Amino acid sequence: AQVAQFRGTELSPPLAVELSPPGPELPQLQEMLVPAMAESEMNVLIYGKSGWLGGLLGDLCAQKGIKYQYAAARLENRQQLAAELDSVKPTHILNAAGVTGRPNVDWCESHKVETLRTNVIGTMNVADAANERGIHVTLFATGCIFEYDEAHPLGSGKGFKEEDTANFHGSFYSHTKALVEDMMQNYPNVCTLRVRMPIGDDLQFHRNFIYKIARYAKVVDIPNSMTVLPEMMPISLEMARRGLTGIYNFTNPGVVSHNEMLQMYHDYYDPAFTWANFSVEEQAKVIVAARSNNELDCSKLKAEFPELLSIKDSLLKYVFEPNKGKKEADMVRMAAAPK
């Protein structure tokens, strides 16, 4: 064993401390990365069973015949998490777990410890334990860590790129996400997806961004990058299969404003729908934490998936055209649903 000497005051003798021999080195980068593999070879572990994205990921795996299961361990419990990884031996982890707050991110302002426990400690635990075992991790993160600035002005078409550093810390939720994204870049086994304002094809689902803004008394009208889940979630699974790593802006190319989206909602889904606007300054008076507004540059994702639709085309194809004229049927369906 090695012996290290630490000397205190001039009168005290050297203090000898026996050091343990160094442990085995962790796998190097080239050994860590999971290569592309056939779907039949994948064994997927999903975190976030009770969440919207986690549920969609399980459904996708089932549809594709990919072996999967939901994690039972709590992210913040390293011992439970490690034991589960050693038992399941997944090839891929899809981490869609996280605290966003109920009913919105304002909750995180008064529950900071709970937010940190999952969004920072838990997320780091998953990445680190998976890294030790050579497991690929797809992290469903957020793009709500930026806001329009002088270098990326509103309406300029110049979006934030993957290498840009977060410039929005107006909410504690976004602050935790920005911290974690910065640390995640040190893990060669992680693919971080910046999701924004997720939109689904069920216009009566309470987590759907369109459902939310259609029920606000007033909305701000600012163009934003957004993620159309029916198109993007299958892409996320394919990214995992390919073993892609690093940060990706995970939104459809381009931006859409709240008014443009609500106009589509009116035209395709609810002809009787009306809405009202207010300014960002007026909005600030009725919310606790500031909200992120930005455009993300999706060139990197588009290069990997050239077929990716622009945000407005994707909204039409995957959300509004399939729901055209279905408002009354949806109302009947929701009325019959168990409370």
Image (tube, grey):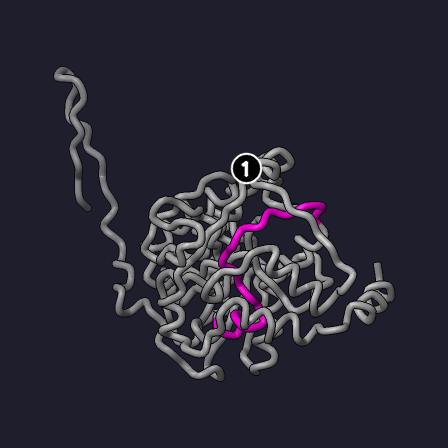
Q: Which residues are magenta?
A: 216-235
Compared across the picture, whether 287 is left or right of 1 comes to right
Residue 290 visible (yes or no): yes
**In the image shown, does 96 or 33 lie closer to the viewer?**
96
Any magenta on residue 221? yes
Residue 78 visible (yes or no): no
Quarter of the image where one finds residue 325 = bottom right
Compared across the picture, whether 103 is left or right of 78 comes to right
Q: Is residue 131 above or below residue 166?
A: below
The secondary structure type at the circle numbered 1 is: helix
**Residue at point 44% right, 56% down?**
295
**Residue at point 27% right, 64% down?**
29
Amino acid at circle 1: Lys
**Residue at point 23% right, 50% down?**
21
**In the image shown, does 37 or 20 lie closer to the viewer?**
37
Q: Position of residue 11 (x, y in %)?
A: 14, 15
- Report the label total: 1
Q: Position of residue 221 (x, y in %)?
A: 58, 50
Report the magenta stretch's main SS: loop
Q: What residue does disc 1 label?
A: 112
Q: Position of residue 268 (x, y in %)?
A: 70, 70
Q: Quadrant of the C terminus?
A: bottom right
Q: Is residue 320 above or below residue 179?
A: below
Q: Is residue 263 above or below residue 290?
A: below
Any magenta on residue 321? no
